[in-house]
Image (cartoon, grey):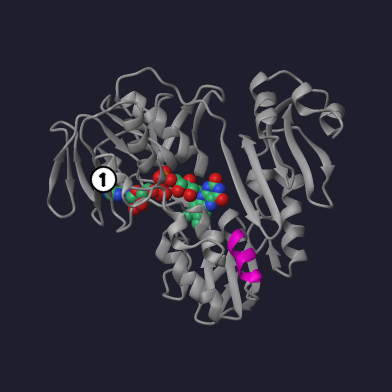
Amino acid sequence: MIVGAGLAGAKAAEALREQGFDGRITLIGAEPHRPYERPPLSKGYLTGGTDRAGVFVHQEGWYADHDVELRLGVAAAGLDRGAHHVELADGDVIEYDRLLLATGARPRRPPIPGADAPHVRYLRVIEDCEALKDVLGSVSRLAVIGAGWIGLEVAAAARQAGVAVTVLEAARLPLLRVLGPEAAQVFAALHRDHGVDLRLGVTVSEITAGGVRLGDGDEITADAVLVGVGAEPDVRLALRAGLPVDDGIVVDAALRTGDPDIVAAGDVANAFHPLLGRHVRVEHWANALKQPAVAAATMLGREAVYDDLPYFYTDQYDLGMEYVGHVEPGGYDQVVFRGDVAAREFVAFWLRGGRVLAGMNVNVWDVVEPIKALIRTGTPVDPHALADPNRPLAAL
Ligand code: FAD
C-alpha cells in the first residue's frame, strides 16, 4: 500500500510493477486528482505554456492497465502498525503487508497577522495554481513574501503577465541559505533587471487588506499577496503511528523507517545519505522521482540503497538552472565560477578543502553528469582548471 498520491507515490507504484510485483497495490491520495507534477504549477501551467493534461504523472488509463487501485479524495487518517492496517477518513480500513509513506509536504504558514486571509495565496496544489493564474490575469500589483524558489518563480510569472511585483525577503539576498552570497546575487540582479522591486532584509509584520505592512512601518500596496516561505513535511500520519520523526520521517539509506514493514520516500523522507554521511531531506522533484525505485526494492525485500546526489532545477524568465550536490549553509570555503556570470551563462562550483561539494549550471547544459562525477570522486581539483571553460570537466 502507498499513502500519498503525489509524484513519489505514483513512481513507487510504477517501480513495484517494473520490479515484478504482481500483488495488490492501493494508492491512497487526499487530493481528488490522480498524481501530478508540481514544478509546472509555478512555471508552464501558471504562465499558460503547459496545459492541464501535461501535468499528470501517468495517463488516466495507466492505473487500471497496471492494476493499481486508486483511492483519491480521501486521506489516510490512522495507521495501526500492530494490526497492519490503515484507516481512511471515510471509515474504510485497508490492510497492508508493506507500506510506503509518501505524504509529501505542505506550505509553511508564517505566524503573521493576516496570513490566513482569503486574498493571501500559497502554492502547492493544482487549485492554488489555477486560482493564482486568475489572480495574475486580473491584478496589477502582487506582493510576494519570501524570495525562495517558489516566490521567485511566481515573481517571474507575474512579471511576464505584466503585473508589478514586490518581493519581500528577510535575508540580505534571495536564496542566500542555499546558494551563499556569491551566487545568490545573480538571482537578485535577474529579478531587478526584470523590474521586480526586491526588498531585502525586511520583516513583514502584517498582511492587510491592501497589501503588506513591514516591521519598520512601511506599507507595500498590493492587490494580492503570495506567501512562499518554504514547506514542512507532512508527518501527521507518521507521528500518530509513533514512527521516528525529525524534520520528516527518519529513514535509513534503504528508506526503511523504524518499522521494517514501512518505508518513506519523497519530500517527507529524511533519509540517511551514504555519500554525504548524514540524513538529508530533499524537497525536490528528482528525489521524488528516483527514491521510489529504492523504496519499492526495499518493500520487496531486496537490497537497495539510495545514494543519488540531490538535484534540482528552476526556470525564471530566460534563465534555466540546474544544481547538483549538497552544501550546508556556510559549509564551503570557496566558490569557483566558470563562464560569464554577467551574461548569466556559467557554472558555479562550491568547494571545501579543494573538493567539489556542489555545482550549479546556469544557461549551460549537459554538464550535470561530469559535475556529479567531480563530487563523487571527492579528490581535490585545481580551481584554475575548474574555472577554465576550455578544460573539459570530465577531464579534471
Ligand atoms: P507531494 O508532491 O507533496 O505529494 C504528496 C501527496 O500526498 C499529496 O497529494 C498529499 O495530499 C498526499 N497526502 C498527504 N498526507 C496524506 C494522507 N494522510 N493520506 C492520503 N494522502 C496524503 N522541485 C524541483 O526540483 N524543481 C522545481 O522546479 C520545482 N518546482 C516546484 C514548484 C511548486 C509550485 C511546488 C509546490 C514544488 C516544486 N518542486 C520542484 C518540488 C517538487 O514538486 C516536490 O519535491 C515533489 O512534488 C515531491 O513529491 P512527493 O510525492 O514527495 O510529495
Quarter-of-image position of residue 143: bottom right
Q: As rendered, which of 139 and 257 lies closer to the eye?
A: 139
In the image, what residue occupies the spot 64% across and 64% down? 156
- Residue 205 location (% of width, % of height): 55, 69
**Which quadrant: the C terminus?**
top right
Does residue 155 appear left or right of residue 279 in this picture?
right
Label 1, ligand 1: CB separation under 8 Å: no
Residue 330 visible in rendering: yes
The x and y percentages for residue 153 are 60, 59
Residue 144 vertical position relative to residue 342 in the rendered view, above or below: below
- Most prominent secondary structure in the magenta stretch? helix
Residue 362 part of the magenta-drawn span:
no
Residues packed near mark 1 inside 10 Å, few (<14), some (14 to 19) or many (20 plus): few
Identify which residue is drawn at 33% across, 45% down: 62
Tag 1 secondary structure: helix
Which quarter of the figure has residue 338?
top right
| Residue labelled with disc 1 | 64
Kind of residue at disc 1: Ala
Tell me if residue 128 comes above or below residue 322 in the rendering: below
Judge by depth and name the residue closer to the eye, 126 or 121.
Answer: 126
Relative placement, left or right, of 214 versus 183 is left
The image quadrant where one finds the N terminus is top left
Q: Is residue 159 magenta?
A: yes
Give the magenta part as a residue range. 153-160
The quadrant where residue 294 appears: top left
Residue 88 is left or right of residue 247, and the answer is left
Residue 396 visible within the image: no
- Residue that appears at 69% across and 30% down: 371
